[in-house]
Image (cartoon, rainbow, N blue to C red):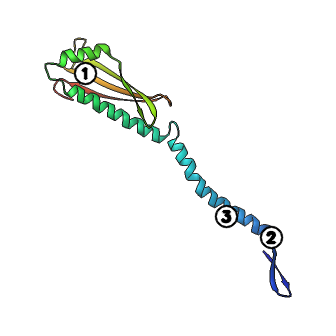
Amino acid sequence: MTMRWRKNGLTPEGFTLIEILTAIVIASVIGVAFVTPYFISARAFGPGGPADQGQLSFMTLGQMELFRSELSALSVDQWTSSIISLASASPYRAPDGFADGKPFTVLRRVACFESDLSTTDQSCSSGYALVSVTVAELRSDQSLTLSLVKTREGL
């Protein structure tokens, strides 16, 4: 700011171009510091962002745990008949659900294998089954699949 001497002392007359440009640069840097976190969070919580991925992972883990507990409740005697019926209906949809207002579908698959886990066993008598759960979030077209091997004696 330039100063001019008057009768009653120094008084401001106006701002110089350099002072105005310096103020604009400082305001821009401060503005970027406040606006950047907003855009980062909007990207993270928008469709397909890491927050959606985390929620999808959480839903898939929950659905797999539910399916695992259902299968763990089978006794050795119930194994063959139950697994055969699940494998013959495979893949089948479990009840759909909602999480944070977003609809998702659950698809379960069961396939029976021999002990080498590469040869298919149509009779399901060998005691090995590959169990998969796929959860798809309908709005974002994202899906996640988890698989595990279930044996007659356990997981």
Quarter-of-image position of residue 3: bottom right
Q: Nearer the viewer, residue 73 or 98?
A: 98
Is residue 80 positioned above or below 36 on the image? above
Distance Cα–Cα, label 3 vs label 1 = 64 Å
Q: Which residue is drawn at 50% across and 42% down?
A: 45
Quadrant of the drawing holding the N terminus? bottom right
Instruction: State the residue lying farthest toward the left.
Output: 77
Among numbered discs 3 and 1, the one appearing first in the sequence: 3
Q: Nearer the viewer, residue 21 or 73?
A: 73
Distance Cα–Cα, label 2 vs label 1 = 79 Å
Q: Residue at x 23, y 25 (%)?
A: 71
Instruction: State the residue lying farthest toward the right.
Output: 7
User: Residue 26 got which mark?
Assistant: 3
| In this picture, residue 5 sits left or right of residue 46 | right
Distance Cα–Cα, label 3 vs label 2 = 16 Å
Is residue 27 positioned above or below 130 on the image? below
Q: Where is residue 17 in the image (x, y as percent from the top left)?
A: 80, 67
Among numbered discs 2 and 1, the one appearing first in the sequence: 2
User: Residue 129 got which mark?
Assistant: 1
Instruction: Tell me if I can see residue 126 in this picture.
Output: no
Q: Where is residue 24 in the image (x, y as percent from the top left)?
A: 71, 62
Q: Mark 3 falls on what kind of element?
A: helix
